[in-house]
Image (cartoon, rainbow, N blue to C red):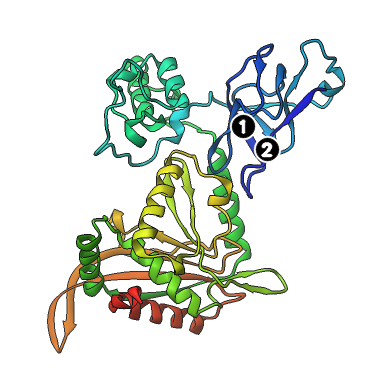
Amino acid sequence: MATKILMPKLSDTMTEGVILKWLKKEGEKIKQGETLVEIESDKADMELEAYDSGVLRKILIPEGGHAAIGALIAIIGEAKEDISNLLTEAPSSRPSSEKIDASKNLPIQESTSGSLSAVESGSRVKASPIAKRLAAESKIELRTLIGSGPQGRIIKRDVVPLMSEKKETTKKSTVPIPSEGYRDIELSLIRKTIAKRMQESKQTVPHFYVTMEINMEQAMSFRNQLNTMTGFKIGFTDILVKAAAIILLKHPNINAAYLGNATRQFGEAHIAVAVALDDGLVTPVLRNCGQKTIPQINAELLDLVERARNRKLKPEEYQGGTFTISNLGMFGVEDFIAIVNPPEGAILAVGSIIEKPVVKDSAIVVGHTMKVTLSSDHRIIDGATAARFLQDLKLLLENPVGLLL
């Protein structure tokens, strides 16, 4: 009996998917569990496995085509099986205005420090399937690359920059720029989703903002001691996640969601952290942060960020947050305001640590301060509630020994 392959729902905000690559051709045999197709959602690139064994009888959505969730994209069946009745369900494919190129997913920053050679002691090169395919299509010799994946494995991000270089040498621009001096670029699925959700948030959520400046001298010393003692490279975001988790559990009215006729207060702090991508951002979620140590948070966050930038997050890893932190301090941003990510009740915008004159014991000395701004949903959070939350967060960061209790 023929099996229908439908466009899966890969995220809570996904409404359609784009076919990036069919890994099997029509008429080819396929076994249950084999990877059939690569799909782009609004959050990640996912590989869809075949539900059953058989022959790939029909591909209904070509590479680069868009299909709504639940739409029929392919049919697997016996070689001579009649599938005519299923073909009547075929959706119309909406092609992309330009050829889908994996280089769209290139992260803003990549690092290959400490990576190993991908060539093993034998002749085989360790590389992911996607990296091998991209290298073959662009005629890139994998043996010349240094892998940044586990055990020196070559992964997608190692190949994509070289693809861009090759394109530049053969053609100055892949998108012709009219004489008027502009070009139109189709929005990616992730950018469309961000546009829709942020517009809805600003239109429907009554935002208000509370900013507070925090003395970071003790937090900086605490971080240095942690790095020395643990051997980890702890970041300030790791410390902020832990601090926010502790304070959120004391302020359940901040660790909350608006449900229309009710407020849902959460008993655990599941903190989402904004991660910048080339065409937008995602917010992977660190769960039960109040129960984790700072080194545990550090290790988990590094893993989530790495996979977010390679669009390899699982749907459950970017859903279910109760609070979000957006840190632009590494870009030298002193302060900013962020838009609440519904149904969460609040988001914390974090600026950079600034060296500036401060008053201490009636004298002016050099200090280090950081501004944070809490954006809140006024339907469930009031100004005094937000201010008390920031007061307690400030107290904890200025006395970070409390992070170890």
Q: Is residue 374 above or below residue 228?
A: below
Which residue is at a point 81% across and 10% down the rendered structure image?
A: 80
Q: Position of residue 316 (x, y in %)?
A: 58, 50
Q: Element at badge 1?
A: strand
* Sequence-wise first label, 1 or 2: 2
**Which quadrant of the figure has residue 219?**
bottom left
Q: Position of residue 296 (x, y in %)?
A: 38, 59
Q: Position of residue 289 (x, y in %)?
A: 45, 65
Residue type indicated by callout 1: Leu
- Residue at label 2? 8
Nearer the observer, 19 or 399: 399
Q: Is residue 187 visible?
A: no
Alpha carbon separation for disc pair 1 and 2: 8 Å
Q: Is residue 232 left or right of residue 245?
A: left
Q: Element at badge 2?
A: loop
Q: Is residue 146 left or right of residue 302?
A: left
Q: Residues within 10 Å of mark 2 (few under 14, many from 20)?
A: many
Q: Are marks 1 and 2 in contact (CB under 8 Å)?
A: yes
Q: Residue furthest front?
A: 121
Q: Residue furthest right?
A: 85
Which residue is at a point 70% across and 26% down the rendered structure image?
A: 93
Q: Is residue 92 left or right of residue 45?
A: right
Which part of the image, by quadrant, shows the N terminus? Answer: top right
Nearer the observer, 237 or 104: 237
**Which quadrant of the figure has residue 292?**
bottom left
Q: Residues within 10 Å of mark 1 (few under 14, many from 20)?
A: some
Residue type indicated by callout 2: Pro
Which residue is at a point 87% across and 21% down the rendered structure image?
A: 85
Q: Is residue 196 visible?
A: yes
Which part of the image, by quadrant, shows the C terminus? Answer: bottom left
Q: Name the mark nearer the viewer: 1 or 2.
A: 1
Q: Which mark is residue 48?
A: 1
